[in-house]
Image (cartoon, rainbow, N blue to C red):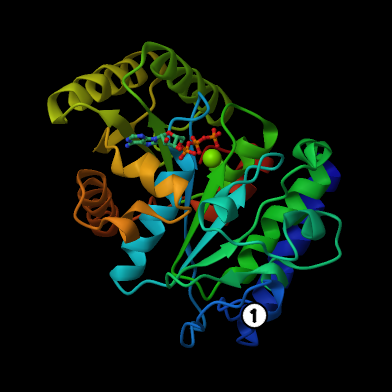
Amino acid sequence: MEDQAEKLREIMRHKKDASASGDSFDVSGDKSNVEAPKTRRGDLGRDGKKARIITVTSGKGGVGKTNLSVNMALAFARLGKKVVVMDADLGLANVNVMLNMIPKYNLYHVIKKQKTIREILVETEYGISIVAGASGFSQIANMGDEERQDFISELDTLSSADIIIIDTSAGVSSNVLDFIAAADDTVIITTPEPTAITDAYGIIKIIATEYNALNMGLKLVVNRAKGAAEAKNVADRMINIAGQFLNLRVDYLGFIYDDQAVPQAVLRQKPFMVVDPKCKASQCVQHIVERLDKNKPRESGGFGAMLRKFFGQDA
Ligand SMILES: Nc1ncnc2c1ncn2[C@@H]1O[C@H](COP(=O)(O)OP(=O)(O)OP(=O)(O)O)[C@@H](O)[C@H]1O
Ligand SMILES: [Mg+2]
């Protein structure tokens, strides 16, 4: 614990020095890190501000995290934001598959210290940048504490982005909990299926136990709903239980219709917001992003919250 604390102080010192010297990086990515170069987006650099980190997670797998992450990114980009999607599913990467891209370098190289996050960032043809996951290297899904902290502190080097969306693996691991601690907002996604609800509640419970804080910036999205009423019903139950029994605030962010346009777009390896911008799912994601954009992120989020966690204080 002593070592960890010293390490984090060191990171903070470095951060201060970097911001004093105006040292902020461009998130426009490295064009050489992709086999088929895509169109280049304009200058993304903007100094001296902190990116909003949105972590997307779920209890059960396959409930729509990657689709939500990628399509939310597109909706934010349409609002004029500079967005990076990071595939932090360390073991089963799929953001790049969903976008039909094969970056030469991915998080494997970052974790092995061969590249920095900034160096592996690639632009897409959709006006967002991605940090590709490390598919097929399941051993790195279990990083050591120190490696994980190094890795998360690297996120700070993407400070010229407005929004960083982190697509995590399903379920609870130390990795996922660190991404939640580093986030300004954590979007928990479930479907109306009882198993998905139970698993989503499971992750909320672990977050409550781990952080002992009322407001962790948790937000709930109900995916694959038949309609607003079904989704609201699922959300109300979960939010009430979290408030009553766990003393944890969860806000309802919205729902996404079960929509055939989603699997159709997945098959074409394109985001559904691009294939069918008017489909029900696209409209729902648009609403979710407008709501997020109106909401300010929690004050105590981000890097500060991660430090407080290590120093054992409430966030
Ligand atoms: N709103 C929706 N309507 C219809 N089908 C959907 C919807 N959202 C997701 N799906 C289906 O669920 C599949 C899984 O979605 P996605 O890959 O986004 O989930 P995930 O949570 O990222 O999965 P994993 O845990 O494996 O990473 C999609 O390929 C699609 O077929
Ligand atoms: Mg996924």
Q: Nearer the viewer, residue 106 or 263?
A: 263
Percent position of residue 239, x then y? 29, 23
In the rendering, at what x and y percent does residue 235 appear? 26, 25
Q: Is residue 157 above or below residue 188?
A: below
Q: Is mark 1 within 8 Å of ligand 2?
A: no
Reply above or below: 63 against 292.
above
Residue 195 x/y as whole percent: 43, 13
Q: Quadrant of ligand 2?
A: top right
Give the left or right position of residue 109, taking residue 249 as reference.
right
Image vertical order of residue 135 relative to residue 204, above or below = below
The answer to whether residue 132 is seen in the rendering is: yes
How many marks the image carries: the answer is 1
Residue drawn at x 55%, y 58% is 100
SS of the residue under disc 1: helix
| Residue pictured at 38% horizontal, 13% vertical | 245
The amino acid on which the numbered mark 1 sits, given as a three-letter code, is Lys
The answer to which quarter of the image holds residue 25 is bottom right
Please tell me how crowded label 1 is: few (under 14), some (14-19), or many (20+) other residues with Cα within 10 Å. some
Residue 221, given in percent of the width and then of the height, sits at 32, 35
The answer to which image quadrant residue 232 occupies is top left
Q: In the rendered image of this protein, does residue 295 appear above or below residue 115?
A: above
Asked whether 233 or 100 is in front, the reply is 100
| Image position of 294 (left or right of 214) | left
Residue marked by disc 1: 31
Q: Identify the residue at horizontal 81%, vertical 39% (top origin).
A: 1
